[in-house]
Amino acid sequence: MAIIAISRGTFSGGEALAKCVAERLGYPCLSREANLEEAAKTYGVPAEDLTAAMERPPSFWQRVVGERAAYLTFVRACLCEHAQADNLVYHGLVGHLLLPGISHVLRVRVIADLDYRIKAASAERKRGYPEALAYIEKADRERRQWVRFLFDVEWDDPHLYDLIVNLSRVSLDMACATVARLTEQDEFKATPESRKAMANLALGSRVSAQLAMDPRTRGVGVTVVAEDGIVTISGETRFAEVNQTLQAVARHVDGVTEVRSKVLCTSDRPERLTRSNV
């Protein structure tokens, strides 16, 4: 029982591999696009806005810093709800980065030679070679910038993955069989500890999403960590009443048994003495 996160570049064949693996193992298959749609519906964000935001380059995110954390929180929370059941194939851009610390996530990157990708793009989008090449280069550039900006890693860093498959050199059937075989290895089987980590991540994500959705707490810079139903909120706020509201909102999330606050109220800090006020 594993969670398979397939990172796919534009027209690299990742979607086809994800569907093949899901069919072979009998797992549900969730795409990045479907997860975005579900997140938009669940948390009341216009689907086109959420989708556009998750595809825009850093220049866009720098203009909407407050929404950046909220959007990512919504997407992660929805993915966690699916991933809690194990037995999931997710395909999209660096989905495994949304599930940190979960040992039974098999991280797969799908690549392909440029000619392979151009042919695929030309066939699907009915474009000539120059247009297909320009489209792929633009998509790759924006996705690389997006990952670097939001996660501070390089999209194509091999250390981020357990398996890299080149579909222009390996057949789809062979790649599918290889991924399926890896899920049978002990390294990628769910354990009580990894399931507990997944449950904690899911609960923390639900709380973060609720805080991001509530107009009273949206935009407050806090970190949420969950451990066996106990939620700890850390960060800073200028107002003590905001700290109280953060805790109240968190308490109403299903699965939360206790809320602990490590939120620092900056208004309580003593003023630093200067020559002007001595």
Image (spheres, rainbow, N blue to C red):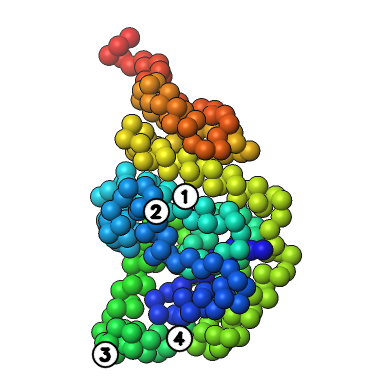
Amino acid type, residue under disc 1 in the picture: Ala
Amino acid type, residue under disc 3 in the picture: Gly
Asked if disc 1 and disc 2 are in contact, CB closer than 8 Å, the reply is yes
Query: Which is in the foreground here, disc 2 or disc 4?
Result: 2
Query: Tag 2 or tag 1, which sits nearer the N-term?
Result: 2
Task: Farthest residue to the top: give it.
Answer: 278
Q: Left or right of 102: which side holds 109?
A: left
Query: Which is in the foreground here, disc 3 or disc 4?
Result: 3
Visible residue check, residue 157: no
Q: Quadrant of residue 259?
A: top right
Q: Which residue is mark 4?
A: 113
Compared to residue 251, the image places residue 195 above or below, namely: below
How far is mark 1 from mark 4, CA to CA? 34 Å
Asked if disc 2 and disc 3 are in contact, CB closer than 8 Å, the reply is no
Q: Which residue is mark 1?
A: 77
Query: Tag 4 or tag 2, which sits nearer the N-term?
Result: 2
* Image coordinates for residue 138, horizontal then vertical, percent: 30, 74
Q: Residue at x 36, y 63 (%)?
A: 145
How far is mark 3 from mark 4, CA to CA? 17 Å
Q: Residue at x 44, y 80 (%)?
A: 12
Q: Nearer the viewer, residue 7 or 30?
A: 30
Compared to residue 183, the image places residue 75 above or below, namely: above
Q: Secondary structure at mark 1?
A: helix
* Image coordinates for residue 47, horizontal then vertical, percent: 30, 57
Query: Tag 1 or tag 3, which sits nearer the N-term?
Result: 1
Asked if disc 3 and disc 4 are in contact, CB closer than 8 Å, the reply is no
Q: Secondary structure at mark 2?
A: helix
* Image coordinates for residue 161, horizontal then vertical, percent: 57, 68
Count residues near mark 3 (Cα–Cα under 10 Å), then give few for <14, some for 14-19, many for 20+. Answer: few
Amino acid type, residue under disc 2 in the picture: Ala
Q: Nearer the viewer, residue 39 or 71?
A: 39
